[in-house]
Image (cartoon, rainbow, N blue to C red):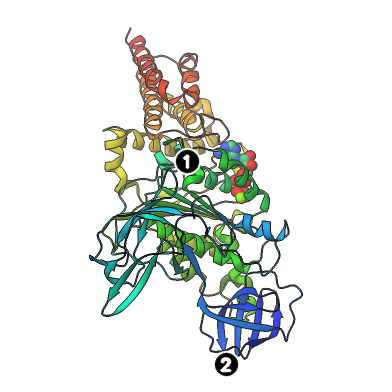
């Protein structure tokens, strides 16, 4: 028996007479069979949020319960895909319905005809359990796709054989106590529940992003969480895209959630052209894009977030490091608010539902570095953009996000207006991973990195204090020492922190080069101070061409940077030496 539509209110549909409804059952709504999900059950009535436009849907039309939960299909063929919020491949649904996506269109998430060459990695008749890797498929040049036993299945494996299979064909069976389960290259997972791990462990290495202000000053760990709040135009999207392009995660999931379509179009144009700095291979080989732009139905924003994180967990379970960017989580929160309003739930702060904080926390909890069910280690780093109205982060989405994340990149409109990009404010931002990562940095950049980093931070903080004093007494009244601090801070800001996303060289800086750049800036500062002690004036020091040399350093290609740095260090010695005369 199928139900009937009783009332339609935007993305919310109330149905009556639905057979045996359970929370989060997926239903097909109306003659068009629009995909929706039961989000509330109230006696005879099932309240459904619909993931497609409900215009023209009328009371009396049928509602059918599929009795299954919103799930994603996981298997080879995910990489390089571009999906909408409910994992329909955008190119396939466009093929089917033209530029205007028709409603009720279904499309299989991964190609069912393609054959993948499967190589078993365990012997037949061995004991296996959920999460165990039983074989491999080369999904792209960059990623070896590990075929895992679905969670919840355990027993003796049989029928494994090397060969070419589609994602739907049986590749093995696992049996226990007379019960047998078929194994395929693909499996399904309910997006609302997290994929289990054995245990979470403390992150101990950074996600290297090639963005200097991030890697050097406010790093996020692999398996960590970061929030990027900022007003309109402050650079959230550019940062998220830079991270998606350059981060050294194995797999990237980029969720465009509720933002303008042209931004997503920009990604769709540029990403296929880019190659990964480490391997030189196209980045789409390790990337999955999920696009739920502002013109698409609001309810699907939530689905897009869950679809994204579930796919991220699946690749993590293979032992990979995955990074997920979501732009913007505020649009998801706004969708929650809209749906909650239509359900006439008791509103919390600023009209958001009372469970907003819990939903946000649960999302970020799916990040982490973990020991997996199969004993490997994998990680998910989650970086969420937040768009507080007017840039005021005292609002609920920002506050709840800051509670749930450990890195805060505070985007600042005054920096953006001054064309200081990335406009990450170095005084307000923080990373709670700095201590955990110190060892990694001293091993991988250089031994005394910590000293250089701390010196840099103290110069920047001192600059802020001195600027307050300058307001009162004027620049000329400052002691030489403070004037030198201002010089050094300016150099850190302009020559190091400012980084153009659009310059071919500057767009990505290796961690090694970042270390050398900061070392040079700090060495020149020290040399200036020695010279100043001996009576050399600031005006005189400013005439030294070394400062220009430092400003050019960001544009010096990687393979020349060591020699370049050595020559600046010589200049530093000379500046000190001259002072000795
Ligand atoms: N790292 C950067 N380098 C150069 N320009 C940038 C950078 N970050 C932001 N911008 C400039 O700022 C504009 C707005 O950035 P965007 O990321 O779209 O802001 P938001 O998403 O916060 O609204 C960009 O179109 C670009 O011109
Ligand atoms: Mg944006």
Q: Is residue 319 above or below residue 461?
A: below
Q: Is residue 57 above or below residue 570?
A: below
In the structure shown, which secondary structural element does the residue marked by tag 1 occupy?
helix
For marks 1 and 2 on the same chain, the one whose residue lies earlier in the sequence: 2
Q: Which quarter of the figure has residue 343?
A: bottom right
Which residue corresponds to the image point at 72% horizontal and 56% vertical from the top-left? 99
Which residue corresponds to the image point at 48% horizontal and 45% vertical from the top-left? 285
Frontmost residue, 433 versus 294: 294
Count neighbours of disc 1 (C-alpha within 10 A) and say few if under 14, some if 14 to 19, many if 20 or more.
Answer: many
The quarter of the rendered structure image containing the C terminus is top left
Horizontal side of residue 29 vs 480, given as left or right: right
Frontmost residue, 230 versus 183: 183
Q: Is residue 566 visible?
A: yes
Q: Which quarter of the figure has residue 141?
A: top left
In the structure shown, which secondary structural element does the residue marked by tag 2 occupy?
loop
Frontmost residue, 449 versus 488: 449
**Residue 89 tag number:** none
Image coordinates for residue 394, horizontal then vertical, percent: 54, 60
Image coordinates for residue 527, horizontal then vertical, percent: 36, 19
Looking at the image, do the residues carrying marks 1 and 2 touch, with CB atoms under 8 Å apart?
Answer: no
Frontmost residue, 58 versus 394: 58
Count neighbours of disc 2 (C-alpha within 10 A) and say few if under 14, some if 14 to 19, many if 20 or more.
Answer: few
Rounded to the nearest angstrom, the CA distance separating label 1 from label 2 is 51 Å
Q: Is residue 415 visible?
A: no
Q: Which residue is mark 2?
A: 43
Image coordinates for residue 300, horizontal then vertical, percent: 60, 66
Q: Which residue is mark 1?
A: 246
Q: Which quarter of the figure has residue 339?
A: bottom right
How many marks are shown on the rendered structure?
2
Horizontal side of residue 244 vs 378, given as left or right: right
Image coordinates for residue 151, horizontal then vertical, percent: 35, 69
Farthest right residue in view: 56
């Amino acid at each position: 028996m199928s139900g009937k539509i009783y009332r339609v209110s935007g993305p919310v549909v109330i149905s009556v007479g639905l057979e045996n409804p359970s929370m989060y059952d997926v239903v097909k709504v109306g003659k068009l069979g629009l995909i929706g999900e039961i989000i509330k059950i109230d006696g005879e009535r099932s309240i459904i949020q619909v993931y497609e436009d409900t215009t023209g849907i009328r009371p009396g039309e049928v509602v059918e319960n599929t009795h299954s939960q919103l799930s994603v299909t996981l298997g080879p063929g995910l990489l390089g895909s571009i999906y909408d919020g409910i994992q329909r491949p955008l190119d396939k649904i466009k093929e089917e319905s033209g530029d205007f996506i028709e409603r009720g269109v279904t499309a299989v998430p991964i190609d069912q005809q393609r054959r993948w060459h499967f190589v078993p990695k365990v012997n037949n008749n061995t004991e296996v359990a959920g999460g165990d890797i039983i074989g491999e498929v080369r999904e792209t040049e960059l990623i070896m796709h590990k075929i895992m036993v679905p969670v919840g299945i355990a027993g003796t494996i049989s029928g494994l054989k090397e060969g070419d299979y589609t994602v739907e064909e049986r590749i093995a069976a696992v049996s226990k106590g007379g019960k047998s389960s078929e194994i395929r290259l693909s499996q399904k997972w309910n997006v609302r529940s997290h994929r289990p791990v054995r245990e979470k462990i403390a992150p101990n290495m950074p996600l290297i992003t090639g963005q200097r202000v991030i890697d050097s000053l406010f790093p996020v760990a692999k398996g960590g969480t970061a929030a990027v709040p900022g007003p309109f135009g402050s650079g959230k999207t550019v940062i998220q895209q830079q991270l998606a392009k350059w981060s050294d995660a194995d797999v990237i999931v980029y969720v465009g959630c509720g933002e303008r379509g042209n931004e997503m179009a920009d990604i769709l144009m540029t990403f296929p052209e880019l190659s990964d700095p480490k391997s030189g291979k196209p980045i789409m080989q390790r990337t999955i894009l999920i696009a739920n732009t502002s013109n698409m139905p609001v309810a699907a924003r939530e689905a897009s977030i869950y679809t994204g994180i579930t796919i991220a967990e699946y690749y993590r379970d293979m032992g990979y490091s995955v990074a997920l960017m979501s732009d913007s989580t505020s649009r998801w929160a706004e969708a929650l608010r809209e749906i909650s309003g239509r359900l006439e739930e008791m509103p919390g702060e600023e009209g958001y539902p009372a469970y907003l904080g819990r939903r946000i926390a649960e999302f970020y909890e799916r990040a982490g570095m973990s020991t997996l069910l199969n004993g490997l280690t994998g990680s998910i780093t989650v970086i969420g953009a937040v768009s507080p109205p007017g840039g005021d982060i005292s609002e609920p989405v920002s506050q709840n996000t800051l509670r749930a994340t450990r890195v805060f990149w505070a985007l600042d409109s005054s920096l953006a207006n001054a064309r200081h990009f990335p406009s990450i404010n170095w005084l307000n931002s923080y990373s709670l991973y700095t201590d955990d990562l110190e060892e990694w940095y001293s091993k991988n950049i250089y031994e005394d990195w910590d000293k250089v980093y701390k010196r840099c931070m103290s110069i920047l903080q001192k600059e802020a204090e001195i600027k307050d004093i300058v307001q009162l007494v004027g620049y000329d009244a400052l002691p030489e020492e403070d004037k030198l601090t201002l010089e050094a801070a300016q150099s850190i800001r302009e020559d190091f922190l400012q980084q153009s996303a659009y310059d071919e060289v500057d767009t990505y800086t290796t961690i090694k080069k970042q270390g050398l750049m900061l070392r040079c800036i700090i060495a020149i500062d020290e040399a200036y101070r020695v010279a100043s002690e001996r009576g050399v004036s600031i005006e005189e020091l400013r005439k030294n061409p070394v400062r220009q040399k430092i400003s050019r350093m960001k544009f010096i290609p990687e393979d020349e940077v060591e020699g370049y740095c050595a020559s600046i260090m010589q200049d530093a010695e000379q500046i000190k030496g001259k002072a000795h005369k």
